[in-house]
Image (spheres, rainbow, N blue to C red):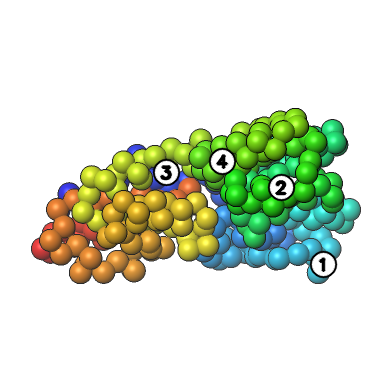
Amino acid sequence: MQVILAKSAGFCFGVKRATQMAFEAAGKEQKTFTLGPIIHSPQVVHKLEDLGVGVVNDLSGVHDGTVIIRSHGVLASEMEEAQRKQLEIVDATCPFVKKAQEYVQYLSDAGYSVLVVGDADHPEVQGIVSYGGKDRIYVVASGDEVRKLPKMGKMGVVAQTTQSFDNLRSVVTECLRRGGEVRVFNTICDATAVRQQEATELAQQVDCMVVIGGYNSANTRRLAEICTDLQPRTHHIETASEINPEWFRGVERVGVTAGASTPKWIIDDVMARLEEINNSH
């Protein structure tokens, strides 16, 4: 059985940076915590907890110490609260997410109605939205949703960093059909597009796909969806312990990819487990 690992599987730049910053901050003597999970990998979150870095969902009960801002970013009001309480802030927000936040603020200040292309329930999107004005900011998941919006003279468009380019284009196309001025900032991270392209190519060449990453990771779930469409024998797992040897009966080629929040040690564990299964056949 041949096992093929996608070239870009695993941590993207922003996640690697955030994780490094969190582990470096773990050595501080004062109490340290992340505001929300640092990345969408339960295993990384647990490792940090073992080093004394807890997770809080809000700052209401926090009055001192170090707060680490997760890679997805936080609400503008939460950042302001941390500053007001004079907490030591380690801002591990992904630079691509930070750029989207800045564009939303700029567009809102310039009088545009702002459309954020993405998942309204995702913490990254909620953070991006919070940097705009309270009025005239909308989250849309697709071009179809643009048609339901009120008429706007000036529209500004940004995207959740893990969106597909095709989805952003469908929203922009619908905006252009509505007339008026449309200003677009492409805030999609290349890492997402690269992983999706590699997964698309790999899923067409193999008899079975294994996608590694947190079940709460949007970009990992998207990789699993892409692979399943092309190769129905696709399995989304978080760790090597979930692998079932029965998946590989009669399989000659296995493809493996991993989301942008999946650490290398988890990928290595999966590859080692697949090697064990291969040797036992």
Above-or-below relation of 157 to 149: above
How far is the residue under mark 2 from the one under mark 1?
21 Å
Sequence-first disc among 1 and 3:
1
User: Viewer-proximal residue, 209 or 69?
Assistant: 209
User: Viewer-proximal residue, 163 or 183?
Assistant: 183
Name the kind of residue labelled 4 in the image: Ser
Q: Within 10 Å of the Cα at label 4, are there few (<14), some (14-19), or many (20+) other Cα atoms?
A: some
How far is the residue under mark 4 from the one under mark 3?
18 Å
Element at label 3: helix
Disc number for residue 128? 2
How far is the residue under mark 1 from the one under mark 4?
40 Å
62 relative position to 276: left or right = right
From the image, tell me which residue sits under label 3: 196
Sequence-first disc among 2 and 1:
1
Disc number for residue 170? 4
Residue 28, percent across and down? 68, 54
Q: Are marks 4 and 2 in contact (CB under 8 Å)?
A: no
Residue at image location 67% in from the left, 48% down from the top:
147
How far is the residue under mark 1 from the one under mark 3?
39 Å
Q: Quadrant of the C terminus?
A: bottom left
From the image, tell me which residue sits under label 1: 60
Q: Are marks 4 and 3 in contact (CB under 8 Å)?
A: no
Name the kind of residue labelled 3 in the image: Gln
Sequence-first disc among 4 and 3:
4
Tell me which corner region of the image, top left, top right, bottom left or bottom right, holds residue 30: bottom right
Mark 2 or 1: the one toward you: 2
